[in-house]
Amino acid sequence: MAYILECRHIDKTYQTGKLEVPVLHDVNFAMEAGEYVAIMGPSGSGKSTLMNIIGCLDRLTEGELLLDGEPVSQLSEKELALLRLRKVGFVFQTFQLLESETALGNVELPLTYAKVPRKERRAIAAEALEKVGLGDRLEFKPSQLSGGQKQRVAIARAVVNHPKILLADEPTGALDSKSGQQVMELFRALNQEGVSVLMITHNREIASYADRVVEIRDGVLLDGWRPTTPLPIPSVQPEDAVAAATAAATAAAAAVAAAAAERPASVSPSSPILSAPGIQVEEPGDGFFDDVDEEPTEDLSEGFFDELDEEEDRDAAAIIDREDADKKAVGTLRAKGDGEAEKVATLLDKGDSEEEAVTAKMNGEAKSTSAEAFDTDKTPATGIPAGGSEEVDT
């Protein structure tokens, strides 16, 4: 089988000033087309760096990387961007959705970059969201979605261009266990459709959903292993469990009744169980379990996400309610602030008026003083009649 991915003697070293920090050491790894592989390691092991190199988001220091048989080490930035668009899908732990766009708008983005006509890309994006159980949330923005729903939007965006390989970096790290389980089911379904899936995780339980697990420690890739019993996705609904338990209880009661009535040879009258003081085995009457309603089993292909979506809807509604309350509080504060501003403006206006009055009064007093000081019959400084002259003794 052809390899979708090959890492040959890859080294990665970061340069910080004069300090060199080695992260990956002689990594050799190959992945067949259609495979589901998990790379597992603790924080600081180099797994995210390896994922960035495989996804053509970072460049290696030494070695060679082949993606779908194509060497990528010497490609330009523009060529790498085109390669990512056509062959790689990304799913991140923190979703990386545009908050200003709807779910449909976020899924449309790769198609926009691929220059798919608007009408066609909207139909393709809607189909991708329908596939992950979000067909009724096309116009919801990320702030209106729960964590599990956001990750499903991110998965729809990652596969909308039909990539050759899907790269998932800690895809369940920000999710509760139930939402994480649903994401794992989506990855399994995509893999069964032929999509190659490479997942990065530190969680052994999550890694066990893959067909093959490769461990990484201190930048060194260790021998891989295959989960002997991959963790199953529960396939029994609560109603099915009730029906199964009821049937089992009915069968057990019938067996006890038959044993008590017939006293088979294997259970003698002197048996310690049947002859112990104070213990009587009574035959249950007809309709012993009539009050237990058996629920019919449901087709799992219908409403797979309904229960999850109801819970997530409640979470999203709570978030929206809190946001509305916050907005009302902000509005109240703004209104109060406007009122205070009006009061300040009134005080300033009053101050201006008083200042004008004081100024006017001062101007009036100044004019009055000037009139008294400058008599019209005398010069201001000497008191000599106007037009007269002072005699000077010689």
Image (tube, rainbow, N blue to C red):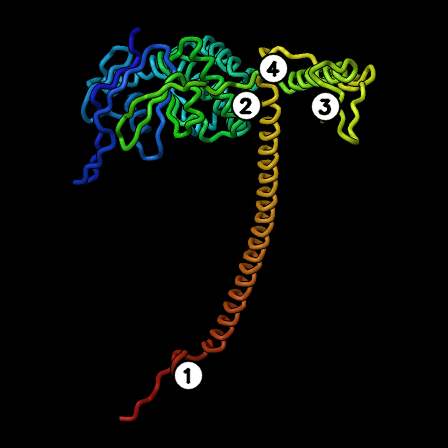
Front in this rendered view, residue 177 or 227: 227
Sequence-first tag of 1 and 2: 2
Label 4 Cα neighbours within 10 Å, binned few <14 / some 14-19 / many ≥20 = few
Q: Nearer the viewer, mark 1 or mark 2?
A: 2
Instruction: Please indicate whether residue 375 sits to the left or right of residue 52 in the image.
Output: right
Considering depth in this image, is 305 or 76 the residue closer to the camera? Answer: 305
Q: CA distance from mark 4 to mark 2?
A: 20 Å
Instruction: Note whether residue 367 is visible.
Output: yes
Q: CA distance from mark 1 to mark 2?
A: 93 Å
Which residue type does callout 4 highlight? Gly
* Quadrant of the frame with the C terminus: bottom left
The kind of residue on which mark 1 rests is Gly
Among numbered discs 3 and 4, the one appearing first in the sequence: 3
Report the residue marked by disc 4. Answer: 303
The first of marks 4 and 2 along the sequence is 2
Which amino acid type is marked by label 2?
Phe
Q: Position of residue 57 (x, y in %)?
A: 30, 24
Whole-percent x and y of residue 17?
19, 40
| Res 333 label | none
Density class for disc 1 (Cα within 10 Å; few <14, some 14-19, many ≥20) is few
**Which residue lies under the disc numbered 2?**
140
Q: CA distance from mark 2 to mark 3?
A: 68 Å
Which residue is at 55% across, 28% downward?
A: 144
Instruction: Give the residue number, with chain letter if any, for mark 1.
Output: 383
Task: Tell me where residue 177 appears, x and y as whole percent.
Answer: 52, 28
Q: Secondary structure at mark 4?
A: loop
Residue position marked by numbered label 3 in the rendering: 271
